């Protein structure tokens, strides 16, 4: 049975199982008189989950993200919620992705320095997403900064050092200019942009640095503001934990173009499997990995297994020939892996599934697919679970 369909049952069990708790009630009147009507009570239940995701950054450096999801439900409805993602928790490099200075997404940094001859624009950096560039990191500089400096005077390069065309530079920096209702042109005074940061005030430049967020492509602001938008959405729509779990399965999936991620206003974050796992832990106390069912027909036994992939739960069916005890087929019945990456491994008859069948006697020898190691591990784990389970039947 697909564990995704079990989440509703799990939540019902959790809520029902808490019915023995002493409910929160209105304060008893000091008077000994019997109240004229029975005061209503509410079943308030706390929940808390910490889920750690380990991996590497885009630069190949180690990272860990700890997803924190805690609050209270009242009669099953989430009524308070703290949702945060802590990078490198427990280390000197720990920071919250909700911190404007912690995670660079739809944020812009400006630095102005005073020189012997006046002022210098050390950097006017902008980080975000745009369909032409994907994730971008763009920096503008200018060695001499005064009231006559205009946008055309800036040297604007991407993170590789390649200089941007006028068209691309205007397109990217327009996201920042929108914060001050400026229609950006090559003749726009740079002072107008620096005023957004508080680095140009009362007709004078101000030496210093500052960071601001901006409404990026399709409206998403900084990562922290997007997380807050998700929390606001959950609370405003009287959602249960199970509702949130389903939302993270179906909304803002990584396979969707970012322009289609508009179900939650102000949040375009891709809901990869870690969001689902976080809520699953809040509901059930721990993640599920293992066999959910098996069926036997015509001398063949199929073992159904759930493991945790990159995009969420992966349901794998492993079929054994009862005469030989060997695996004859591996098929993935349900998954939310990334299109063109992990999803390729899950296709019927994929090279990786074929390799697992061929290498079933020595699964350690089957190498993970580069770029899809999490999916590879989830599928290999599923086969291991199936073999262990089958051998005990």
Image: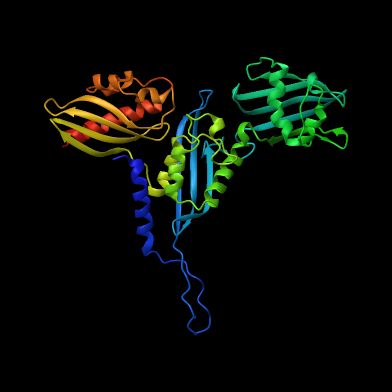
In this picture, residue 156 sits left or right of residue 285: right
* Residue 371, position as x, y percentages in the image: 44, 21
Q: Quadrant of residue 138?
A: top right
> Which residue is at 44% across, 49% downward?
241
Name the image quarter holding residue 351.
Answer: top left
Q: Residue at x 45, y 35 (%)?
A: 53
- On the question of residue 81 being in view, the answer is yes
Q: Position of residue 242 (x, y in %)?
A: 42, 48
The residue nearer to you, when weighing 355 against 93, is 355
Determine the residue located farthest toward the bottom in the rendered image. Answer: 33
| Residue at the extreme left | 323
Q: Position of residue 162 (x, y in %)?
A: 66, 14
Q: Residue 19's x, y, as percent? A: 37, 62
Number of marks present in the image shown: 0
Above or below, 4 against 107 in this view is below
> In this rendering, is residue 377 above or below 198?
above
Give the quadrant of the C terminus. Answer: top left
Q: Is residue 368 left or right of residue 214?
A: left
Residue at (50%, 23%) from the top-left corner? 60
Give the position of the N terminus as an image quadrant. Answer: top left
Colour pattern of the rendering: rainbow
Give whichever of 289, 297 is nearer the camera: 297
The residue nearer to you, when weighing 199 against 74, is 74
Residue 52 seen in render: no
User: Looking at the picture, does residue 32 appear above or below residue 283?
Assistant: below
Q: Residue reaching furthest top?
A: 162
């Amino acid at each position: 049975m697909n564990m995704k369909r079990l989440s509703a049952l799990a939540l019902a069990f959790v809520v029902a199982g808490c019915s023995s708790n002493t409910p929160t009630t209105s304060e008893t009147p000091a008077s000994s008189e019997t109240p004229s009507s029975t005061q209503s009570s509410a079943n308030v239940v706390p929940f808390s989950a910490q889920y750690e995701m380990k991996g590497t950054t885009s630069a190949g450096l180690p990272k860990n993200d700890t997803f924190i999801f805690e609050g209270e439900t009242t009669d099953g409805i989430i009524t308070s919620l703290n949702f945060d993602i802590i990078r490198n928790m427990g280390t000197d490099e720990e920071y919250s992705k909700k911190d404007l200075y912690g995670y660079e997404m739809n944020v812009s940094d400006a630095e102005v320095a005073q020189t012997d001859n006046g002022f210098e624009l050390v950097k006017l950096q902008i980080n975000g997403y745009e369909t032409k560039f994907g994730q971008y990191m763009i920096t503008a500089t200018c060695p001499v900064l005064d009231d006559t400096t205009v946008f055309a005077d800036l040297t604007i390069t991407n993170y590789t050092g390649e200089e941007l065309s006028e068209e691309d530079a205007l397109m990217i920096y327009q996201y920042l200019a929108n914060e001050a209702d400026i229609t950006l042109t090559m003749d726009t005074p740079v002072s107008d942009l620096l005023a957004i940061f508080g680095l140009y005030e009362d007709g004078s430049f101000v030496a210093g640095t500052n960071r601001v967020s901006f409404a990026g492509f399709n409206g998403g602001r900084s990562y922290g503001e997007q997380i807050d938008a998700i929390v606001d959405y959950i609370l405003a729509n009287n959602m249960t934990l199970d509702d949130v779990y389903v939302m993270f399965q179906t909304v803002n999936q990584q396979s969707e173009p970012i322009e289609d991620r508009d179900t939650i206003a102000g949040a375009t974050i891709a809901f990869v499997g870690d969001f689902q796992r976080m809520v699953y832990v809040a509901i059930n106390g721990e993640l599920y990995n293992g066999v959910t069912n098996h069926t036997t027909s015509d001398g063949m036994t199929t073992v159904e297994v759930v493991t945790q992939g990159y995009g969420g739960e992966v349901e794998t069916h492993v079929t054994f020939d009862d005469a030989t005890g060997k695996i004859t087929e591996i098929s993935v019945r349900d998954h939310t892996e990334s299109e063109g990456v992990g999803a390729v491994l899950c296709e019927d008859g994929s090279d990786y599934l074929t390799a697992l069948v061929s290498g079933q006697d020595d699964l350690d020898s089957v190498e993970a697919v580069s770029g899809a190691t999490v999916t590879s591990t989830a599928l290999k784990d599923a086969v291991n679970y199936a073999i262990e389970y089958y051998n005990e039947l």
